[in-house]
Image: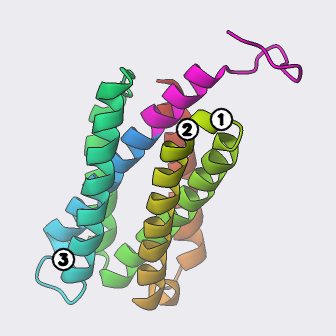
């Protein structure tokens, strides 16, 4: 590992930092696909179904791109994918059972955390000039995640009783999932 003059013990080298980013983002996009699939399982015949299908299509595209990164860069995927398969669907279906606006509140909370997450990664990638394409991909995905957040807000996510509490719970669990998926 080539150490920069600002390197400190415990710092991660570029190769491992990129692998961690790809692992966690692959897991996150997988979980997002499962959340939207859970929402659609419940809300398929409701007014928001078309919006959810659009967001799901974008998340599937993101996942496809990370599947390519996993293979081409030979990155080990998260060992937690089976959990995200179950928990993602359960979160999507569980909030959708409570109504369209609750499902949208879930979307807003998740996407706000993902916005922060991608923003941090984009900032880190500024230190890696050979990763301009990855940085650009992250920026495109971040913009689409913000679009999903805005869709949820425009569909009345903030109007539900207990919005703040639900949002805080979903954000906390999303942050834990990110922390775990970077490592496991």
Q: Quadrant of residue 4?
A: top right
- SS at mark 2? helix
**Residue beneath disc 2:** 131
- Which residue corresponds to mark 3? 43
Could you tell me residue 5's position as x and y percent?
88, 19
Neighbour class for label 1 at 10 Å: few (<14), some, many (≥20)?
Answer: few
Which residue, given by chain and number where applicable, does mark 1 sit on? Answer: 128
Q: Residue at x 36, y 34 (%)?
A: 69
Return the disc, 3 or 1, that comes first in the chain's sequence. Answer: 3
Residue 41: image quadrant is bottom left
Q: Is residue 52 left or right of residue 111?
A: left
Name the side, left or right, on which 178 lies relative to 44.
right
Question: Taking the image as drawn, is residue 87 in sight?
Answer: no
Where is residue 181 shown, x and y percent of the image? 47, 33
Instruction: Name the spot of residue 101 as percent of width and height, x first.
Output: 38, 83
Q: Secondary structure at mark 3?
A: helix
Q: Nearer the viewer, residue 135 or 35?
A: 135
Figure coloring: rainbow
Distance, label 1 to label 2, CA atoms, is 6 Å
Q: CA distance from mark 2 to mark 3?
A: 39 Å
Bounds of the magenta segment: 1-24
Asked if the residues shown at circle 2 and circle 3 are in contact, with their CB atoms under 8 angstroms apart, the answer is no
Q: Is residue 94 above or below residue 181?
A: below
Task: Tell me the number on the disc at residue 70.
Answer: none
* Residue that sits furthest to the top in the current view: 1
- Residue neighbourhood size for the residue with mark 3, other residues' Cα within 10 Å, grouped as few (<14), some (14–19), many (≥20): many
């Amino acid at each position: 590992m080539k150490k920069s003059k600002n390197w400190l013990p415990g710092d991660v080298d570029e190769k491992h930092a990129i692998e961690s980013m790809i692992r966690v983002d692959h897991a996150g996009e997988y979980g997002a696909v499962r959340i939207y699939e859970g929402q659609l399982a419940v809300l398929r015949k409701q007014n928001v179904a078309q919006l959810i299908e659009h967001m799901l299509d974008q998340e599937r595209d993101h996942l496809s791109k990370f599947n390519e990164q996993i293979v081409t860069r030979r990155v080990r995927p998260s060992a937690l994918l089976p959990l995200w398969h179950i928990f993602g669907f359960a979160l999507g279906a569980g909030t959708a059972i409570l109504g369209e606006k609750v499902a949208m509140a879930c979307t807003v909370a998740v996407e706000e955390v993902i916005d922060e997450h991608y923003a941090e990664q984009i900032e880190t990638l500024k230190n890696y000039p050979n990763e301009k394409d990855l940085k650009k991909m992250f920026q495109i995905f971040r913009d689409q995640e913000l679009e999903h957040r805005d869709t949820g807000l425009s569909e009345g996510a903030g109007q539900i009783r207990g919005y703040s509490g639900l949002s805080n719970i979903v954000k906390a669990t999303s942050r834990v999932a990110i922390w775990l998926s970077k490592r496991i």
